[in-house]
Image (spheres, rainbow, N blue to C red):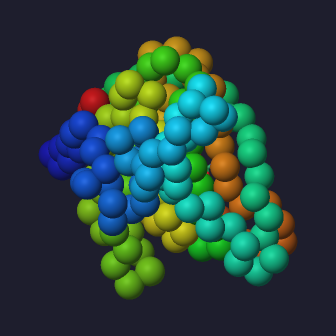
Amino acid sequence: MSTPVKLLRAVPLTADAFRPFGEVIETDNASEIRLINKGTTTRFHDIAPVDVSSEGGRPLISIFRGKPFTLPVTITMLERHPLGSQAFVPLSPRPYLVVVAHDEDGRPGAPLAFLAADGQGVSYARSTWHHPLIALGDVSDFLVVDRGGAGDNLQEFDLPEPFALEA
Ligand SMILES: NC(=O)N[C@@H](O)C(=O)O
Ligand code: NI
């Protein structure tokens, strides 16, 4: 008899819970709030670092257009970017899923899943294990800030067993 696929259930994304993996990009997580432009604009300052200069890297701004996944999502691999951080800010008004894991001697530990909602963005710290973009509901656009330049900035790891990810 085949062993059942392990369930991975997402929990609501919060800055505190995500802190070991990077930052949640939302106004509540700003280091400082500044009134600028003669009071016409509020700057929610320094929410997340852009850590891309390793080995001569440069920052890139891209747009990722993600096709929606059907739940449950089968999670079979994780990846990480050893040379730079990677930030995703949703441009479409819908939730999406974030899967991360602690590093355990160069391999990902047990995955953790978060449901990002209400426009929350995430910035994966350099070398943080994560699953590639998981959009939900409809085709979704994300502004992505990550590293460009030479060097191998992608390490992928096939998990020893799959997980069934539920929102
Ligand atoms: N490959 C790529 O640029 N995307 C992944 O890194 C991802 O996290 O979605
Ligand atoms: Ni990535």
Q: Is residue 40 visible?
A: yes
Q: Position of residue 123 (x, y in %)?
A: 50, 53
Q: Residue at x 75, y 45 (%)?
A: 61
Q: Position of residue 149 (x, y in %)?
A: 83, 66
Q: Is residue 101 above or below residue 145?
A: below
Q: Position of residue 147 (x, y in %)?
A: 72, 61
Q: Residue at x 33, y 60 (%)?
A: 19
Report the front residue among 135 and 148.
148
Q: Residue at x 33, y 65 (%)?
A: 20
Q: Quadrant of residue 159?
A: bottom left
Q: Is residue 155 visible?
A: no
Q: Residue at x 66, y 34 (%)?
A: 37
Outermost residue toward the bottom in this view: 105
Report the front residue among 57 and 151.
57
Q: Locate the C terminus and report the quarter of the image it occupies.
A: top left
Q: Is residue 42 above or below residue 98?
A: above
Position of residue 124 in the picture relative to residue 154 (left or right): left
